[in-house]
């Protein structure tokens, strides 16, 4: 499940992710079935957010808050081969809501290695594939069309119809391919922008995403305007 | 002593978790807080959540995922019909066990 409502800053969320990754590793070591393991982590994540929300009391949680919250939880190994109650065997009952300990008091979570390097958004790159059919159309079909027009104009006594006009279905199919490419690029661009905005700094390539989104709509707009002006 | 306490607690967790859901559905952390009121049980996340997942897999609990105002969606658990039957059996057995063990340990038996 993804982080939904309370958007955590990346430097806070990484502590939660590191903790849950360690829980996942412990669960795998214990051979917990994957569906059960995912459910347990979902419960844990929801609990962490609840505790963070209560602790932050309306303000944005800071790294100290998440460290204090995680310090109140059991170490990730408790979800491992030690088993359900194995980790708390003989442990004294914990206070329901202990005061926030200092960050160095009892850190059960390994210190995160720092924010991960942002990745380039793949969706934005995939959007570039839409250029291939458009370029193919321009390179291959436009000259054929021009040639067809040429034949029509120079043919004897009205001349034969151009090839493209004789096969309208071919023209339609040939036109759909670049249209699909344009649509693909634009949709990929929009999806990439959404992904980059939601990734809170973990994805880059916004410039390419914006380019994917606007390039074909702008070209189509310019063509329409030029066409309208030419006809007028 | 510590190992014995742990073993006793382990056996009781399932009963306590199901009993905590007798009054209606609740999400994981809510169940944990209900159980935390029973201080000597010292029930923790690594105890409760795996039990919840296992009971749900066994069909004794039903799970409903709902949005939370605090963050990611919460998983709400409630007893199924089979779970209610099981809880009734467990409660009945617990009564007998409690009476028998108390009599034995504290010498109430004549």
Image: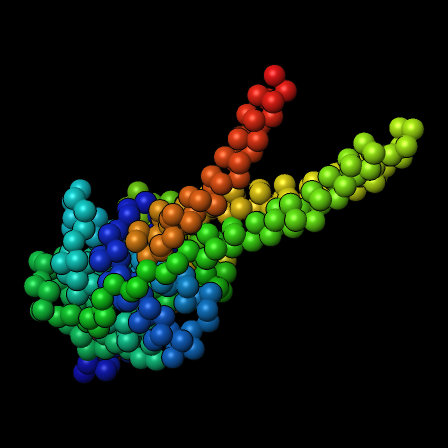
Q: Residue at x 41, y 61 (%)?
A: A39
Judging depth in this view, the residue of A203 and A129 nearest the camera is A129
Judging depth in this view, the residue of A2 and A119 nearest the camera is A119
Give the side of residue B51 with respect to residue B80, left or right: left
Q: Residue at x 46, y 69 (%)?
A: A34
Q: Quadrant of residue A75?
A: bottom left
- Check the image and report above or below for A111 versus B81: below
- Check the image and report above or below for A176 versus B53: above
Q: Does residue B109 show up?
A: no
Instruction: Find residue A125 and report its horizontal and vertical position in percent.
Output: 48, 55
Q: Residue at x 13, y 58 (%)?
A: A64
Looking at the rendered structure, the number of numbered marks drawn on it comes to 0
Assign the C terminus of chain B to one quadrant of the image: bottom left
* Residue that protrudes farthest toward the top in the picture: A232
- Check the image and report above or below for A71 versus A148: below
Q: Residue at x 37, y 67 (%)?
A: B50
Judging depth in this view, the residue of A68 and A176 nearest the camera is A176
Give the side of residue A192 with respect to residue A149, left or right: left
Instruction: Find residue A174 and report its horizontal and vertical position in percent.
Output: 72, 43
Assign the N terminus of chain B to one quadrant of the image: bottom left
Give the side of residue A79 with respect to residue A147, left or right: left
Instruction: Find residue A156 and report its horizontal and vertical position in percent.
Output: 90, 32
Instruction: Find residue A116 and report its horizontal and vertical position in percent.
Output: 29, 64
Q: Quadrant of residue A120?
A: bottom left
Q: Quadrant of residue B52?
A: bottom left
Judging depth in this view, the residue of B13 and A188 nearest the camera is A188
User: How has the structure been colored for display?
Assistant: rainbow
Q: Does residue A7 show up?
A: yes
């Amino acid at each position: 499940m993804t982080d939904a409502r309370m958007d955590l800053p990346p430097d806070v969320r990484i502590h939660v992710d590191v903790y849950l990754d360690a829980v996942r590793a412990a669960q795998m070591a214990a051979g917990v079935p994957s569906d059960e393991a995912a459910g347990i982590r979902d419960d844990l994540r929801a609990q962490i957010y609840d505790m963070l929300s209560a602790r932050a009391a309306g303000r944005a949680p800071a790294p100290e808050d998440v460290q204090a919250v995680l310090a109140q939880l059991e170490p990730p190994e408790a979800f491992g081969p030690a088993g359900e109650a194995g980790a708390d065997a003989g442990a004294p009952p914990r206070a329901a809501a202990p005061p926030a300990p200092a960050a160095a008091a009892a850190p059960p979570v390994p210190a995160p290695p720092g924010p991960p390097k942002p990745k380039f958004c793949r969706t934005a790159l995939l959007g570039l594939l839409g250029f291939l059919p458009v370029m193919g159309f321009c390179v291959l079909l436009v000259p054929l069309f021009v040639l067809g027009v040429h034949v029509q104009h120079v043919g004897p006594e009205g001349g034969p119809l151009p090839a493209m006009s004789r096969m309208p279905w071919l023209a339609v199919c040939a036109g759909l391919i670049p249209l699909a490419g344009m649509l693909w690029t634009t949709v990929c661009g929009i999806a990439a922008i959404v992904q980059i905005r939601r990734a809170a700094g973990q994805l880059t390539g916004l410039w390419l995403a914006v380019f994917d989104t606007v390039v074909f709509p702008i070209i189509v707009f310019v063509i329409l305007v030029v066409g309208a002006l030419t006809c007028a | 002593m510590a190992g014995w306490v742990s073993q006793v607690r382990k056996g009781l967790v399932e009963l306590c978790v199901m009993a905590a859901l007798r009054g209606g559905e609740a999400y994981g952390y809510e169940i944990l807080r209900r159980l935390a009121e029973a201080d000597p049980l010292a029930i923790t996340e690594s105890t409760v959540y795996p039990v919840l997942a296992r009971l749900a897999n066994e069909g004794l609990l039903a799970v409903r995922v709902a949005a939370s105002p605090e963050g990611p969606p919460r998983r709400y658990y409630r007893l199924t019909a089979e779970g209610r039957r099981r809880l009734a059996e467990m409660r009945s057995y617990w009564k007998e066990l409690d009476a028998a063990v108390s009599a034995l340990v504290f010498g109430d038996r004549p």
